[in-house]
Image: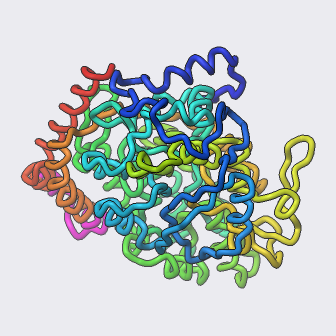
Amino acid sequence: MRSIFKRAVAAAVAGGLALSLVACGSSSDTATTSVEDLSKAASMDGYTVDEQFKATEPVSFSILYSDHPNYPLKDDWLLWSQLKDRTNVTLEPTVVPMSDYESKRSLLIGAGDAPLIIPKTYPGQEQPFVASGTILPVSDYLDLMPNFKDKVAKWKLEPELDTLRQDDGKFYVLPGLHEEVWQDYTIAFRTDELERLGLQAPQTWDDLYTVLKAIKAANPDSYPLSDRFKGNSLLTILAQSYGTSAGWGLPGHLTTWDPETKQFVFTGSSDEYKGMVEYLNKLVAEGLLDPESFTQDDDTAIQKFANGKSFAISANAQNVVNDLRPAIADIPGATVAKIRVPAGPAGDVLATSRLENGLMISSKALENPNFVALLQFVDWLWYSDDGAEFAKWGVQPTTFTKDAAGTRTLNADITFAGINAGAPKHLQKDFGFSGGNFAYGGTTDLLQSMFTPEELEFQDAMADKQQTELPPPHPFNADEQEQATLIETPLKDSMNSATLQFVLGQRDLSTWDAYVAELNGKGASSYVDMVNEAYERFQQNHS
């Protein structure tokens, strides 16, 4: 059963936990510069939880900005003017196309030219920058971020934060914080076809095979499942139900924690990974999964769904509303909906945490005379309830209203995520809110506040899934990271290439042992040894 975290925590307990966070997990979590010596210009004295941050004088902070092609940045967005009015902060964006964001981020950080605030950083992506000293060990400065600390304490997020810690016991990314575990991506089906054939939505991956087989029998010229996202979403949800990792869920260290042996194993050579590969191979061999699913672009996959050449495709809630329903609008009686993520050999599980995409702070921020104000601003916008609501919903009454019961309603002339479809204005395009640079994390109430009744029903159906055990920290030291950098890319390339060959039947599964030997020849065994040594060292030094 999914853990439910109480939002009401006794003030004294929460305060005590919050005060202990800086030291949690490491004796080295002590600020390299004492709080008394930090630059406090423009900061608020006594800034605390749920207080509106407003710099005591106008300040500006640079920020790396991922520009989404569907809602490109506009200088006249209400987001910018309201942010300045509320906080006395002007953001100066370095605008980078979303498609180039990760590579540009690496180049800017490596050259020492990164803006002060570096958002859209997923936990693990900070690791290559730790040894260089170019990003801030943010765990040293949590006393300046009361909203962040309050949520960690109330929601008992310390175990998740521990997974971020580096070899020095500190962490270098401020993650998005969710109150509860949740899942968006799954498989969407043409539900009218399921009804026509008298089929129930599959509850397990074995059920899914049976359903696809029935659809294939009724539509022999189709591939019942033709996927988008280069197969990454399918691989992610399928792998977790096999007790392994793949697709978007493949960890940076390419290893999976085995809770029974208390050791890490190489993901791509495990029995669980082989089981997943065998399942996909069966789907492809029987014509149930389009072999182009792992190479075609999204538009091609959606077009096949629109033309009745396929009947299932990976999707999240917005994909269903924005892509799939418009695509099948010309098919009489066609309907589409997400299914509950199927259960598999590892059980009815979710292998995820309550952390997501967050932000790094450039170490140059320490030289900024407004350093404390900067962290207070970040704390308010990303981690306070009001800041999170502002980033997501906008401004009352211009973009939304909120009644006495706390129910938010988007104004009728504004559309977003299926709300007020056809309205003349768009929350992202015309106002700048609900963009990926700011709006993530927060309470379950805020997360679900824009969900349609259909999506709320999906989330309710997912609520009883079990969360798998989080892997313990296993950070590399600088020497190990240097070795890992040389090993990981060729190992991952070999693993992904062979996986696709096995799935598509281009390589026989009887050669699995030879494939494992090839991985070991490229350093997989020594790599796993290094990961386990890093895990054991961290336990010794920081437990």
Q: Is residue 338 above or below residue 264?
A: below
Residue 381 coordinates in the image, percent (x, y): 64, 49
- Comparing 15 with 529, the one in front is 15
Occupied quadrant, residue 68:
bottom right
The colour scheme of the drawn protein is rainbow
Q: Is residue 184 left or right of residue 121?
A: right
Extreme-right residue of the structure: 404
Residue 437 visible in the current orientation: yes
Q: Is residue 509 magenta?
A: yes
The residue that appears at 61% across and 80% down in the rendered structure is 306
Task: Establish if 491 lies above or below 332.
Answer: above
**Magenta region includes residue 360:** no
Q: Which residues are magenta?
A: 500-513
Magenta stretch: dominant SS?
helix
Residue at screen point 69% across, 17% down: 10
Q: Position of residue 78 (x, y in %)?
A: 74, 67
Q: Residue furthest left?
A: 521
Q: Is residue 51 left or right of residue 20?
A: right
| Residue at 55%, 48% in the rendered image | 374
Figure quadrant of the N terminus: top right
Residue 156 falls in which quadrant of the image? top right
Q: Give how far across and how far down residue 377 sits, in percent.
A: 60, 47
On screen, residue 442 above or below 72: above
Compared across the picture, whether 483 is left or right of 317 comes to left
> Considering depth in this image, is 378 or 508 the residue closer to the camera?
378
Q: Which quadrant holds the C terminus? A: top left
Residue 262 at x, y percent in the picture: 28, 26
Which residue is pictured at 86% across the width and 72% down the height? 413
